[in-house]
Structures are given as C-alpha cells and as structure tokens.
Amino acid sequence: MEKILDIITSKMQQAFADAGFDASFGRVTVSNRPDLCEYQCNGALAAAKQYKCAPIQIARAVAEKLAAADYSMIEAVMPGFINLKLSDHFLQTYLEEMRTAGSFGVPKLGRGKTVVIDYGGANVAKPLHIGHLRPAIIGEAMKRLYKFFGYNTIGDVHLGDWGLQMGLIIAELHERQPELPYFDPDFQGEYPAEAPFTISQLEEIYPTASAKKADPDFSRKAHQATFELQQGRRGYRAIWQHIMNVSVADLKKNYDNLNVHFEQWLGESDADPYIPAMVADMKARGIAVPSEGAWVIPVAQEGDKKEVPPCILVKSDGSSIYATTDLATMVQRMRDWHPDKMLYVTDKRQNLHFEQVFRAARKAGIVTPEVELEHIGFGTMNGSDGKPFKTRDGGVLRLETLISDMTDFVRAKVVENQIVSADAVEDTTRKIAMGALKYGDLSNQPTKDYNFDMERFAAFEGNTGPYILYTIVRIKSILAKYGPWESLPIQAPANPAAKELMLSVTKFAPALESALRSSAPNLVCAYIYELAGCVNKFYHETRILGEEDEHLKSGYIALIALAKNILETSINLLGFEAPEKM
C-alpha cells in the first residue's frame, strides 16, 4: 500500500507538470504549522529561480491543477507556499484501505532477503547484568521490526564461550575437586551426565577464579587449560559442555523473562573451526601481513579523518582475538545463511572494533560487496546521578534484580490503586513493569546515554510505557462495552479531533520505515506517543458510547479500534504487551 505522503506528492508532481513546470519540484511534506494546514509544498520557491517567475505565480498555477475533490483546502500563499488539507472522503478511503490491508498496508520491503542480527552478547558462566539490558531489547526490537517488513530474520546471541574464562573455571574446579574424572587423562569411560556444579555454584566459581589471575601459577594453569580445551582434550570438553548446558538454560530463562528470544544460540566456539583455514587464506593472499610478530590486516583508507589502526588477526603469541572470532563468525554466517545484511548491537565503545572488522571482512572478500554491515553502538544506562548504574556497594546490578525491582515497584502501585482483582495482579503487574522498563529504554535514541528513573518510567502519565498501555486498555474497555466491532468500516471524520486522529494513523508506515532505515526504535516510541495523545484527545472531546446516532457511533468505534490495533502492533514490535485492565 502506498504511503499517503507519496500519493499526495505524486498528485502534486503531476500538477507541476500540468502547469508547465518540472515535476521534481512537487515534493510534499507534513506541515510544520498544523494550525494552518496539514501538508505543504515549497517547490514553487525553488522553481522560481529556474523559470525566472514569481514563486506565488507558480504556486497559484499549480494549485489550479490539483483535483479539488482530494482536498478540503488548497491555498497558494506568499511568498509561494502551497498549503493543503485533505478532504474527508480522501482520508476515509485511505484509512479503510489501511484497516483491511495486511500489516495495515506496510510494504514487505524485505521479502526474499535475510538479515542476521547479532545481539545479547551474553557470556556463559556469568549472570546477566544491567549492561545486558540495552543490547537485548534494542536487538529484539530491531529483529521484530525487520520481520514485520518481511525479512527472514535470524537473531544470534553470539555467546562468549571459548576464551580464557573457560580455562579459569576448569583450573578452579581442578583445585577444588581434583578427583573428578575430567582431570584424569587416562579415564576412558563415560563422563557423568550431571554437571559437577549448579548455576549458583558456577556463578561463584568464575569470579573466584578470575580474582586469581594475578597469581602467576594459577594464571599459567588457566591458560594451559584454555589451550587444551581448544585443542580438544576430552575431559575439558566434557566440563565445557556442562558449563554450556547449565549456563544456557539459565540464560534462556532470564531472556524469556525479558521477552527476548533468539533463533540461534551460537557462540565463539562455533566460529573457532573456521579460524585456521581463514587465517591461512589471508596470509597466502597477502591480506594479512606480519607486524612485530603478529599478523594484521591494514584497513586504513584514503580520506579517513581519524586514524584507523590495522585489524589484528593473530597475536604475537599465536593466539586469536575478538576480531579473529568475529571474522570467522562472518565466514560461518555467509556459508550457512547467505545474509543480505548483518547487524550488530553492542556498546558504542566498540565502534572502532567493528569499523576495523567490517573493513577487514570486505578486504578479504568474506562478505560480498552487496552485503550490508551495520553496527548499532548504544549508549550507557546511568543512574539518577548521571553516572553508570551501580548497586549500593558499587557492584554491577544483576539484570534479574533490576526486573524484580521494577516489578515490585509497579506491583505496589497496582495493589494500592486496586487496578485489578487480586487474581489478576501478577499478570497485570508483569506486563506493566515490562512495558515501563522497555519503553523507558527504547524511547531514548540508542546511541545516547540516558538516566534510569524507575518512578518516571512507571508513571501512568507522560511519555511512558504505562501511558501507552493505559490508552490501549481504555480502548479495549470501550470496545468490550460496544460489542462486535471487527468488521465496522471507517467513516469520514465527524469532528476535528477525529480528523487529527485519522491523520496520525496514516503516519504508521512512515514511522516504521524511518525506524528501520535509521535503526532507531525510539522513532516507533515517538509515533505511538503521538498516536496515544490523539486517541485520548478524541476520547475527551467525543461522546463515543453515549452517541445516539448509531451510524456515527459505529464510525467512532471503527476509528478507535484501528488505532488500538496499530498501538498493539507497535508495542509488540517493541517487545511488550498490554494487560486486559489497568
């Protein structure tokens, strides 16, 4: 379905051509003065220079060529603007087409294309902490947005599961339980199916081991264990598998609580088999060159405004680093999925890393020229003091603790205000808390830092998740009282508030396209906040259920039902849902 602005622009371009001017001057924009008009065209000002004619004369000539039936106002004003208001019939027809079209007429721009979204970035054997919130919910929102536009979407958590942390855990476990069969090089039997630790024990083992890295003897053992694991030592591989099983089960539970779901649970270990051949090929072709004992890929380009250091492929001690793994992961993704795009969601402090990796991948031919590579570098979530969020004792807050704190805060408000019956408190609380948390984050531009404010995020008024949810629930309540509404057609706007709401509804597809193009879920938030405001204005200025004219009433119901469906679709894209009552 064509966007309404494109339809109006096409008509304006035809009017310019019919008036004897170049059609390219007929671009129409949403008016920045809604008190004067709904749409405007400033093309006559630019055309005046080319045609050496007063812009107001061009504007008047073009205005005369526009079909009067499409507009309730066509006005050429000094010095050469063309101001427009859509006719009620035009708007009614467009919204009825939106109502009956699949996905509200949003075009499937990605049909036949595949996008891989690398987000989450969890490390096994470590609990998710507050720093994992943004990559999880930004990545999930972007994945859902791509899927809505018809892309085949593959979300990959890209686990940290193959580095020194594995060796540290193995070395610490060896010190604690040397009698375990995993440490006996002569053991030939089947290893136990049960892990020798729980997730709680594992989360204690790793930081204990990590604190011992300064001990030369322990550090040597950990590095040796890492090496032997990666070389395939049978007992160490069995321990590693236990770590993976215990950790991934816990990670899935926590991501599920956040309503974040991955299609792939691959990690650095899955990329490791691709590294030897990839490195050998780069060396053989001269893509990688020796530098102070290491092998690097020069990626600086003419025109760089800042220094871009070479991408290190192999360190001087022969080991690989994150860049090596990321390049090998690209090899695997290209082989298995042939994506049209790879999108990475990580901390913005990794901007340079991904610039190096992307350039290296293109230079080495790992990705074909038409494959798009993008990094969304997100900002920091800070406390109310503007500093990175910490616990009271200065530690890093666990993600499940943050979710629990937000849930407890919302539950207290739900119970205090007796919003729902006792049996619905938990479900309602969970949905409002998730909406507050996710909208509070996603309404900020991804690249910007922001201050986390639980009270503001959970407020039922203002630009918040609960306000959006309350608007949806209010409409649901009206629809439930009205009765069957699903097949009611859209009618012409009955009052100014209705027309304002209808105009806001037409902005759905453009808002989503802007969010996709800019990799900015905050644009979806901005749109639904505007739409919710129009819904509530319409509600306050219109007797909906009290309207005596049944035909008029059914038109009101059809309009707010369409707005509800768009709001619900939008919050689903953002990763949360509305309760039945609030």
Image (cartoon, rainbow, N blue to C red):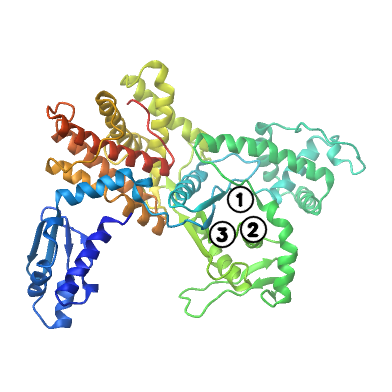
Q: Residues within 10 Å of mark 2 (few under 14, many from 20)?
A: many
Q: Position of residue 58 (x, y in %)?
A: 11, 74
Residue tagged 3: 339
Closer mark to the observer between disc 2 and disc 3: 3
Specify whether residue 384 is in view.
Answer: no
First in sequence: mark 2 or mark 3? 2
First in sequence: mark 1 or mark 2? 1
Q: Exactly how many numbered labels are in the figure?
A: 3
Nearest to the observer: residue 302 or residue 190: 190
Residue tagged 2: 329
Residue type at the position of mark 1: His
Q: Position of residue 172 (x, y in %)?
A: 75, 41
In this rendering, the answer to whether 506 lies above or below 279 is above
Nearest to the observer: residue 125 or residue 374: 374
Residue in view at x 76 percent, y 32 percent: 196
Measured in 3D between alpha carbons, the distance from the residue under mark 2 to the one under mark 3, in whole angstroms, is 13 Å
Dots 1 and 2: beta carbons under 8 Å? Answer: yes
Specify whether residue 275 is in view.
Answer: yes
Closer mark to the observer between disc 1 and disc 3: 3
Residue in view at x 43 percent, y 25 percent: 427
Instruction: Tell me where residue 476 sits by quadrant.
Output: top left
Residue in view at x 75 percent, y 50 percent: 219
Residue type at the position of mark 3: Pro
Dot 1: what SS? loop
Quarter of the figure with the N terminus: bottom left
Residue tagged 1: 158
Q: Position of residue 163 (x, y in %)?
A: 69, 52
Q: Which mark is residue 247?
A: none
